[in-house]
């Protein structure tokens, strides 16, 4: 009796196809570059069918995205699917479709290795599982990065030469001008508004007053239509936008490149005398403000506090007298940009709010359900650590806190606090429970 023949089971290799094109040129065609890249990858995967290779149905296409960074929606979605265990192999038409940055490539390969995912470029023979394959990849990628940097240098040189000739190089046109045949042409209605803004600031010297009056009169930022026909509606002018207008050298007929001014080909709409007067007031205003870097002023709740009335962030601020901090507070961004007429939420004393939040955190860390969650998180990573040790570490926050620098205090609070919402009826603190394990680890190292 002859022995039965057994058929070897070939493991399935789920292949994700990634495609990218740097510009949107030709993407409106029925069969475009992304389709061509995908078809070539599908043909290669089909040739490896005997090895168990199968293409995934999901498409990972990034149209009109640069390969110089990883901020691409399809690539980010692909990385999430890799982390979820849905992908065994990533296939590209060429290496530079995935990335043109050597640093980014190193990060991507680390992610692929961590999840046992291979990478294949169907037009370039290499295998990421061998040292020779990695060497080949790095050589190819070095040339791709060199090409990208050389192209960027050429673009910068062309841009600099054009600016030095006083030419308009695109982007959002300033209020007061329209773009006609790539040149700035005076828009008389808007030019009158710009001159009004300069004169009003020269008369009162108060950005808050100017912003308030502009909103009352309905004067807004530039409304314009892009070359693609997309209309951008102007928005109300807040303080940052006001300063951008007041500092725009285009209004005196100049163009600026790398802090150097060149005569422009467009007509000025603000007299030099008025410009000098306004900039004298601006310089005087900033001379009265502190030159101390903000990072040296303690604000441990920075980026955590939100206004209960507007829902926007409350920024750290302070007043000074004779060079020393007199009063620290958190201020709603809407009130900072315009005035408290737009947001009735008053500024909040920083020391009082920080003390309140820290007291709340201390109480929360003593709650049984929070302690139990912290124990579960820590034991999942360090099973040898006892419950008593974890509880003791949680109680170390009080003595450790006073020894920390403000940046360290902010970092620890961000581990525990999602947001601090300040309203007229009190303060609402939302806990970030997933940071408990990391907090215990931080306290163990202090």
Image: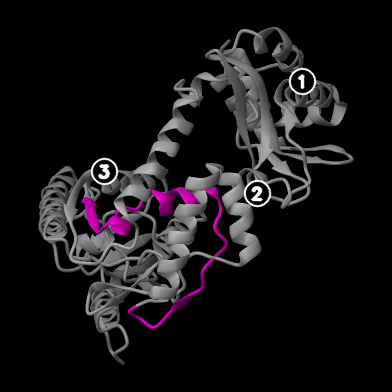
Which mark is drawn over residue 367? none
Residue at x 48%, y 60% (from the top left corner): 196
Crowding at label 1, few (<14), some or many (≥20) Cα neighbours within 10 Å?
few
Q: Secondary structure at mark 3?
A: helix
Residue at x 27%, y 49% (from the top left corner): 105
Q: Secondary structure at mark 2?
A: helix
Which mark is drawn over residue 355? 1
Residue 171 position (above or below residue 31): above
Residue 439 place in picture, x, y as percent: 64, 24
Left-right relation of 144 to 47: left
Residue at x 44%, y 77% (from the top left corner): 57
Residue 332 place in picture, x, y as percent: 68, 42
Q: Which residues are magenta?
A: 227-256
Can residue 384 be seen from the camera position used here?
A: no
Among the 4 quarters of the image, the one containing residue 82: bottom left
| Residue tagged 3 | 103
| Residue tagged 2 | 334
Residue 322 place in picture, x, y as percent: 55, 12
Among the 4 quarters of the image, the one containing residue 18: bottom left
For the residues labelled 3 and 2, the Cα–Cα distance comes to 39 Å
Q: Is residue 233 magenta?
A: yes
Residue 113 position (above or below residue 417): below
């Amino acid at each position: 009796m002859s022995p039965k023949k057994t058929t070897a089971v070939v493991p399935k290799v789920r292949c994700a196809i990634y495609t990218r094109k740097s510009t949107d040129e030709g993407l409106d065609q029925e069969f475009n570059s992304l389709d061509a890249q995908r078809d070539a990858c599908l043909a290669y995967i089909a040739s490896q069918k005997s090895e168990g290779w199968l293409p995934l149905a999901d498409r990972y296409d990034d149209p009109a995205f640069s390969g110089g960074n990883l901020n691409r929606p399809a690539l980010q979605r692909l990385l999430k699917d890799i982390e979820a265990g849905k992908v065994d192999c990533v296939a590209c038409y060429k290496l530079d479709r995935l990335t043109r940055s050597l640093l980014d490539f190193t990060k991507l390969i680390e992610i692929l290795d961590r999840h046992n995912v291979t990478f294949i470029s169907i037009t370039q023979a290499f295998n990421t599982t061998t040292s020779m394959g990695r060497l080949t990849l790095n050589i190819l990628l070095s040339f791709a990065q060199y090409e990208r940097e050389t192209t960027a240098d050429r673009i910068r040189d062309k841009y600099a030469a054009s600016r030095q000739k006083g030419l308009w190089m695109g982007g959002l046109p300033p209020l007061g001008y329209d773009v006609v045949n790539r040149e700035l042409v005076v828009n008389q209605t808007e030019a009158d508004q710009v001159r009004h803004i300069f004169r009003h600031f020269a008369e009162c010297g108060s950005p808050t007053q100017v912003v308030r009056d502009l909103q009352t009169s309905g004067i807004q930022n530039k409304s314009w239509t892009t070359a693609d026909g997309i209309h951008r509606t102007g928005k109300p002018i807040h303080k940052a936008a006001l300063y951008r207008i007041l500092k725009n050298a285009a209004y005196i007929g100049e163009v600026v490149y790398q802090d150097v001014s060149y005569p422009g080909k467009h007509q000025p709409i603000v007299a030099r005398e008025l410009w000098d007067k306004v900039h004298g007031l601006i310089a005087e205003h900033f001379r009265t403000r502190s030159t101390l870097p903000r990072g040296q002023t303690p604000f441990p709740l920075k980026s955590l506090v939100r206004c209960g009335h507007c829902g926007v962030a409350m920024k750290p601020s302070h007043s000074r007298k004779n060079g020393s901090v007199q009063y620290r507070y958190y201020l709603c961004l809407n009130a900072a940009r315009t005035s408290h007429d737009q947001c009735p939420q008053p500024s909040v004393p920083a020391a009082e709010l920080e003390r309140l939040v820290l007291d709340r955190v201390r109480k929360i860390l003593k709650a049984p359900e929070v302690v139990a969650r912290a124990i579960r998180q820590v034991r999942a990573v360090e099973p040898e650590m006892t419950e008593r040790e974890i509880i003791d570490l949680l109680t170390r926050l009080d003595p450790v806190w006073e020894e920390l620098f403000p940046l360290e205090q902010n970092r620890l609070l961000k581990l525990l606090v999602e947001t601090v919402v300040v309203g007229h009826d009190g303060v609402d603190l939302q806990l970030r429970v997933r940071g408990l394990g990391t907090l215990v680890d931080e306290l163990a190292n202090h």
